Amino acid sequence: MSQKTYIPKIKPDERRWVIFDAEDKALGRLATRVATVLRGKNKPEFTPHLDCGDGVVVINAGKVKLTGNKATDEFYHQHSGFIGGLKSTSMGDLRENNPEKLVTLAVKRMLPRNRLRAKILKHLRVYSGAEHQQQAQQPIPYDWEKDTV
C-alpha cells in the first residue's frame, strides 16, 4: 500500500473568477466569504500551503454596510516611524473616501500572515462602483442564499 500524500496540481488556467456584490452587505460577513473563496477553502482539493483559490471581484464596495457604531468608533492607524507620526482614519471616513481600501484591508486581515497572503491578494479586485474590468474572465456571481459559488 502506497503512503504518499496527494498534492494537487494547481494550473493558472483552472482558476475561476467569482463576483461579489457588496451592496447592503455587512463588511465582516462579506470579508469572511471573500477570504474563504480566495484561499480555496470551499474546494475539496484545498491544501493549506498552496494558492489553490479562485479570483474574486468585489463590486459596489462604496455601498458596504457597517453595523453598530463602527463608522465612528473603529479606526485604522498608520505610523510613519517618526515622533508624532500617527495618522488615524475612522471606518466611516475610509468608506466615503477610499472604499476599495476598506474592503481590501478587511479581507487581508482574515488571511494567514505569511508569504502566501501576498500571493493570494493578487487575485482580489475591488471596485467602488458597479462597473468592473474583469469581463474577460467571465466571473461567476456568488449566491448569498446558498453560500456557494
Image (cartoon, rainbow, N blue to C red):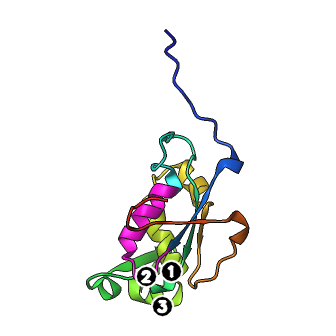
CA–CA distance in space, label 3 to label 2: 10 Å
Q: Position of residue 60 (x, y in %)?
A: 52, 82
Front residue of this view, candidates 126 and 108: 126
The residue positioned 40% from the left and 61% from the top of the image is 147
Residue lying farthest to the top in this orientation: 1
Q: Position of residue 11 (x, y in %)?
A: 68, 43
Q: Residues within 10 Å of mark 3 (few under 14, many from 20)?
A: few
Circle 3: element type: helix
Q: Amino acid at mark 3?
A: Glu
Q: Magenta stretch containing residue 28, yes or no?
A: yes
| Start-end of magenta stretch | 21-37
Residue lying farthest to the left in this orientation: 68
| Mark carried by residue 96 | 3
Prevailing secondary structure of the magenta residues = helix
Q: Is residue 108 visible?
A: yes
Q: Position of residue 34 (x, y in %)?
A: 47, 63
Front residue of this view, candidates 114 and 78: 114
Sequence-first disc among 3 and 1: 1
Lateral position of residue 121 relative to residue 64, left or right: right
Circle 1: element type: helix
Sequence-first disc among 3 and 2: 2
Q: Magenta stretch containing residue 103, yes or no?
A: no
Mark 2 vs 1: CB contact within 8 A:
yes
The residue positioned 64% from the left and 36% from the top of the image is 9
The residue positioned 52% from the left and 89% from the top of the image is 97
Q: Is residue 90 visible?
A: no
